[in-house]
Amino acid sequence: MLQRSLLVAVLASLALLPPAWSQARPAGGLSNNVLKNATYEAPWVAGGEMQLKEGRFDGVHATDPRIAVRTLLIGAPARGDLNGDGLPDAAVVLATSTGGQEVYYEVAAVLNDKGKPVHVATAPIGDRIRFQWVNIRNGTIVVEFFAHGEKDPPCCPKAKTTRRFRLEPGGLREVSG
């Protein structure tokens, strides 16, 4: 009877935990919440970095303060070991607009420093793509999206594309296969 009462008390206390407790996070990893509120280097914005708040940044361009910059973290972050230290790192996709028709997509590598995100490298993916997903496989960041084919109008990219990146000294390097 005591065991059953204890079990009921534990289950009841779990129901009272805040929603962040159940948020997707590998053991010792970076939660979605941490990644969507992290700081990312961005040389094209004033100050050279973006502090996301709930996956969003609004600021001004580094060379022309009249140009507004808006960046969104899109899709689900990928998790896996990028630097061989055994800790689950992350890759996120950021989409940036400066008010025109262009929307620039890039993938950012984020290392796990004891549960704290450290943005270490970024690589461009494309302009006005249709992002599908990002994953980390065997230390390689894999991004799938639709790019513009020869006859595709600007609104509607249809060419299924996969790009792969490895974290190396000096940044992300695109790799084949």
Image: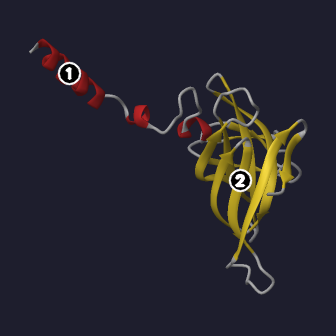
Q: Residue at x 86, y 54 (%)?
A: 64
The image quadrant that residue 21 belongs to is: top left
Query: Of the residues shown, which amino acid type is indicated by label 2?
Result: Val
Which secondary structure, mark 1? helix
Residue 43, position as x, y percentages in the image: 85, 45
As drawn, the label of residue 7 is: 1
Do callouts 1 and 2 mark residues in contact (Cβ within 8 Å)? Answer: no
Q: Residues within 10 Å of mark 1 (few under 14, many from 20)?
A: few
The image quadrant that residue 82 belongs to is: top right
Q: Residue at x 58, y 35 (%)?
A: 34
Left or right relative to 2: residue 169: right
Determine if residue 96 is in view. Answer: yes
Front residue of this view, candidates 163 and 122? 163
Which secondary structure, mark 2? strand
Left or right relative to 3: residue 23: right
Query: Of the residues shown, which amino acid type is indicated by label 1?
Result: Leu
Residue 166, position as x, y percentages in the image: 81, 45
Q: Is residue 23 above or below residue 175?
A: above
Quadrant containing the N terminus in the rendered view: top left
As drawn, the label of residue 142 is: 2
Residue 32, position as x, y percentages in the image: 55, 40
Front residue of this view, candidates 127 and 7? 7
The image quadrant that residue 17 belongs to is: top left
Quadrant containing the C terminus in the rendered view: bottom right
Q: Residues within 10 Å of mark 2 (few under 14, many from 20)?
A: many
Q: How many marks?
A: 2
Q: Is residue 96 above or below residue 57?
A: below
